[in-house]
Image (cartoon, coloured by chain):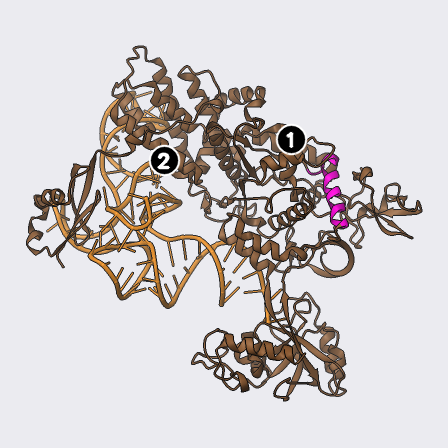
RNA sequence: GCCGGGGUGGUGGAAUUGGUAGACACACAACCUUCAGAAGGUUGUGCUCUUUGAGCGUGUGGGUUCGAAUCCCACCCCCGGCACCA
């Protein structure tokens, strides 16, 4: 279904291709703005409508700021290392090394077909050795700062992807990518010490303008909690159990101690008559398993309450996590719903220590203490302070801050990733590859499938693995694990600033000029993955004085998910996927762009409509025919028309404001109104000034660049619209000379009156009283509310 | 359960942030154009009642106010995230 727009789009795309300078960000006299999209992960699937939404939104803003006279940095690149690409390559029996460049070409062509204005001279690719040389270099800096370390640890292992995963990559016990249930495996893994940055990652969220939801997710993920660690002496044993609590004031309500099955003293606590059951219970409770129901076993041992000296039973239970806090808690069933549930199930006593009428368990912070010896009658807050001080003085407690955040597991037992630049020497241990030997390039191989043994496929490539220790020269082996998918994307926004630099990852002067990213636009699915890792990485670079901002992305905008026409998430199995290529074929790239921006607010989820896109196609056609017809007019007695001046200013005002606020849908609707009025007047034979047509082309340009540029040339303009100044509105036309007053009775609209702008309250009321519709109410009026230039309300009540 | 976002015509959505609810579209209907269709154009379109007109109307119930989609309280539902994190 070829149409005229296809021809127009081809024509201008060819011209843009020949004029790459249009979109180069190299005029350093202008103010800067850095508009960044989350670069695509180059999987096998190609571009989907979500990409189009993301890139079009950013492109509108980029084109707008270029016309506003900014030095706009709007780059694009490719994130291509990692599991999805590798899995796809395996599935289709291709080597990722051959397959990735092909795929990049495909993506690039699709993006160019959309008319997105990227500065292609800055294109980057995370799998290019010239790029990952610096990813590896940065890893070595982490190592120097002791922010990277190798440790054997139980890690989440995906049996399908056959690699260890980070905590962030495990969603509800399943692999983030393939959905398989993960297992726990003990593996020697590289870790990055992200926990050292927990406080700063938390605090600096205050400095960025991000959607509240994403900030909150990061806060939750970091999970900072301040509390107290308290030692409970175990009866008849020479050790004590340390518990963690954030509610120490409820200690008089403690009726049991609960520890996790993996707790180191679990077995030691078992008395002889309980040993059999305890041992059985510990063996049966595999870690990492989802807890559906609380189970537990009594150890036979008792702890001594540090104040009341009563005996408290010690239980082992599955609802206590081994790796949070101390792996042990004091059970306060009256004021913790999990402890309550457990106590109910095993008939343990429940002691209420907060005075409340609400049903137990009461977890609130309001009320006074009861039955708590010297805490009784104190408020919860005061009691907490007092007991904390007391227990610390006794030497059995200390203040402790716990985090949910764990160190970032940084090794993957896969082929398709950046090799970790380490050499394992039998004498020197882990030796970093000297910086001058970087990059450690990934060898080209025939077999790259994961082994599943916990060993990387690289281990089998002997002439790559075997090397010499850079320190002592002894025969050594290379580290065969690779970096995770997220490594390359932790700093790509910096490489765009100076993509061809071979001396350093980017020139500090350029970093100083461009950073931070002003707008970062992309999906919300990266809330605690990429966006957390990149912030951490950036902060390390900041500490090394390699970047000048604490945060990489000043403002974050998430585009909403586009659902299928059936209001369901697009998926192959549902068969409701809309393919952008098809849409371009049936309509045009401009139609696709404008439609996606018109569907609804940029940040909301919204369903696709096959009918809706027709309306946009018609709208663009109306614009095109208006320009074609206008061109034909010979007798150009060009008129300025007062009402058009007004409408023009109003439209410029609206479109300008809306673009800055990412409200593209309402910007487009005001363009529709503007077009309709021009078309209406034109069809009535009115010969209005060309200026109004120029404004239409300029305002349309960010949204539908091909068509706008074509229209621009139809009215005899030669230059690229990219170089044209964004139109300005005339303030004087934004104000109405005559004001419309709403006349209400008891707040309900009855009529309107037009009156001059500076009419006094008296004048307005007098005029309103003359209205026929008001007649029957006038006798009952008790009060008149007057709002200048807006409303006069007659109150009868 | 907790956190974040939301609930407005047949549909997608507007609403200057407390002041004309339903902009702009889609769909539908009638008419114009056409041999016919497509495309285009004009008009109508929240609901109810008998038109004029009136009443009702932004998830539900209450409140504040001259006036509430907008603010407050309670509740229901949908989407996204987290989930025995002590």
Does A168 sit left or right of A187 as displayed? Answer: left
- Which region is colored magenta? A126-144
Q: Residue A142 in magenta? A: yes
Q: Nearer the viewer, residue A387 or A756?
A: A387
Label drawn at residue A652 = none
Q: Residues within 10 Å of mark 1 (few under 14, many from 20)?
A: few
- What color was chain B assigned in the picture? orange
Disc 1/disc 2 C-alpha distance (Å): 38 Å
In which quadrant is the C terminus of chain A drawn?
A: bottom left
Q: Whole-percent x and y of residue A243? A: 65, 75
Q: Whole-percent x and y of residue A408? A: 69, 54
Chain letter for mark 2, please.
A
Say if residue A420 shows up in the picture. yes
Q: Whole-percent x and y of residue A284? A: 72, 73
Q: Which residue is mark 1?
A: A105
Q: Cβ–Cβ below 8 Å for labels 1 and 2? A: no
Q: Whole-percent x and y of residue A236? A: 74, 88
Q: Residues within 10 Å of mark 2 (few under 14, many from 20)?
A: some
Q: Main secondary structure of the magenta part?
A: helix
Q: Which residue is mark 2?
A: A654
- What color was chain A assigned in the picture? brown
Q: Residue A197 in magenta? A: no
Taking A479 as reference, is A632 above or below it?
above
Residue A346 quadrant: bottom right
Q: Nearer the viewer, residue A391 or B43?
A: A391
Identify the residue shown where x is 65% and y is 81%: A394
Q: Earlier in the sequence, mark 1 or mark 2?
A: 1
In what element is the residue under mark 2? helix
Say if residue A673 shows up in the picture. no
């Amino acid at each position: 279904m070829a149409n005229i727009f296809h021809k127009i789009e081809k024509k201008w795309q060819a011209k843009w291709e020949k004029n790459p300078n249009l979109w180069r960000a190299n005029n350093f006299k202008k103010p800067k703005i850095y508009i960044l999209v989350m670069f695509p992960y180059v999987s096998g699937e190609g571009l989907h409508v979500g990409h189009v939404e993301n890139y079009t939104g950013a492109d509108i803003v980029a084109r707008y700021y270029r016309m506003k006279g900014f030095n706009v940095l709007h780059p694009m690149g490719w994130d291509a290392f990692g599991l999805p690409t590798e899995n796809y390559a395996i599935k289709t029996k291709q080597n990722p090394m051959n397959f990735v460049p092909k795929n990049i070409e495909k993506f690039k062509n699709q993006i160019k077909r959309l008319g997105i204005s990227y500065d292609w001279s800055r294109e980057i690719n995370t799998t290019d050795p010239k790029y990952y040389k610096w990813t590896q270099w940065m890893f070595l800096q982490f190592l120097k700062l002791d922010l990277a370390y190798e440790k054997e640890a139980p890690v989440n292992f995906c049996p399908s992807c056959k690699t260890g995963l980070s905590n962030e990559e495990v969603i509800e016990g399943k692999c983030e990518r393939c959905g398989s249930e993960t297992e726990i495996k003990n593996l020697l893994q590289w870790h990055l010490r992200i926990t050292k940055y927990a406080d700063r990652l938390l605090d600096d969220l205050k400095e960025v303008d991000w959607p509240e939801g994403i900030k909150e997710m990061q806060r939750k993920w970091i999970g900072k909690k301040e509390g107290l660690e308290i030692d409970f002496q175990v009866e008849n044993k020479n050790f004590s159990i340390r518990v963690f609590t954030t509610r120490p004031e409820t200690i008089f309500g403690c009726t049991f101690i609960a520890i996790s099955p993996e707790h180191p003293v679990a077995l030691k606590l078992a008395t002889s008559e309980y040993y059999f059951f305890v041992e059985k219970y510990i063996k049966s409770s595999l870690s990492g398993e989802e807890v559906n129901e609380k189970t537990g076993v009594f150890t036979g041992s008792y702890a001594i309450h540090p104040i009341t000296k009563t005996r408290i039973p010690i239980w082992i239970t599955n609802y206590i996590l081994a790796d949070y806090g101390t792996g042990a808690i004091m059970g306060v069933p009256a004021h913790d719903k999990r402890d309550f549930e457990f106590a109910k199930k095993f008939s343990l006593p429940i002691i209420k220590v907060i005075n409340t009428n609400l049903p137990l368990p009461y977890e609130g912070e309001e009320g006074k203490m009861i039955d708590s010896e010297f805490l009784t009658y104190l408020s919860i807050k005061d009691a907490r302070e007092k007991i904390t001080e007391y227990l610390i003085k006794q030497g059995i407690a200390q203040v402790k801050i716990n985090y949910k955040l764990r160190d970032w597991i940084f090794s993957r037992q896969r082929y398709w990733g950046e090799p970790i630049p380490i050499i394992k020497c039998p004498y020197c241990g882990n030796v970093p590859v000297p910086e001058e030997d970087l990059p450690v390039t990934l060898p080209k191989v025939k077999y790259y499938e994961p082994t599943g043994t916990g060993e990387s496929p690289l281990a089998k490539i002997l002439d790559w693995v075997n090397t010499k220790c850079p320190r002592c020269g002894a025969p050594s082996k290379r580290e065969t694990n690779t970096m995770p998918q997220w490594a390359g994307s932790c700093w790509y926004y910096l490489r765009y600033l100076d993509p061809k630099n071979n001396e350093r990852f980017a020139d500090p002067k350029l970093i100083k000029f461009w950073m931070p990213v002003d707008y970062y636009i992309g999906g919300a699915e990266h809330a605690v993955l990429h966006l957390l890792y990149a912030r951490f990485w950036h902060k390390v670079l900041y500490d090394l004085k390699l970047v000048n901002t604490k945060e990489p992305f000043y403002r974050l905008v998430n585009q909403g998910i586009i659902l299928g026409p059936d209001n369901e998430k697009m998926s192959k199995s549902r068969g409701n996927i809309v393919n952008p290529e098809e849409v371009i074929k049936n309509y045009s790239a401009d139609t696709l762009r404008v439609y996606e921006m018109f569907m609804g607010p940029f940040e909301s989820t919204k369903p696709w409509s096959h009918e809706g896109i027709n309306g946009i196609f018609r709208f663009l056609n109306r614009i095109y025919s208006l320009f074609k017809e206008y061109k034909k007019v010979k007798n150009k007695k060009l008129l300025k028309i007062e009402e058009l001046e007004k409408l023009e200013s109003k439209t410029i005002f609206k479109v300008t404001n809306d673009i800055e606020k990412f409200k593209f849908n309402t910007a487009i609707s005001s363009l529709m109104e503007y077009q309709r009025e021009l078309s209406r007047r034109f069809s009535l034979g009115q010969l209005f000034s060309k200026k109004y047509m120029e404004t239409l082309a300029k305002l349309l340009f960010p949204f539908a660049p091909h068509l706008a540029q074509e229209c621009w040339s139809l009215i005899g303009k030669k230059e690229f619209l990219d170089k044209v100044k964004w139109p300005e509105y005339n303030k004087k036309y934004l104000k109405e000379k005559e004001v419309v007053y709403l006349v209400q009775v008891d707040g309900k609209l009855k009529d309107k009156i037009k009156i001059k702008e500076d009419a006094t309250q008296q004048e307005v009321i007098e005029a309103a009283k003359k209205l026929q519709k008001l007649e029957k109410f006038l006798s009952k009026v008790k009060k008149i509310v007057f709002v200048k230039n807006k409303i006069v309300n007659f109150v009868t009540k």
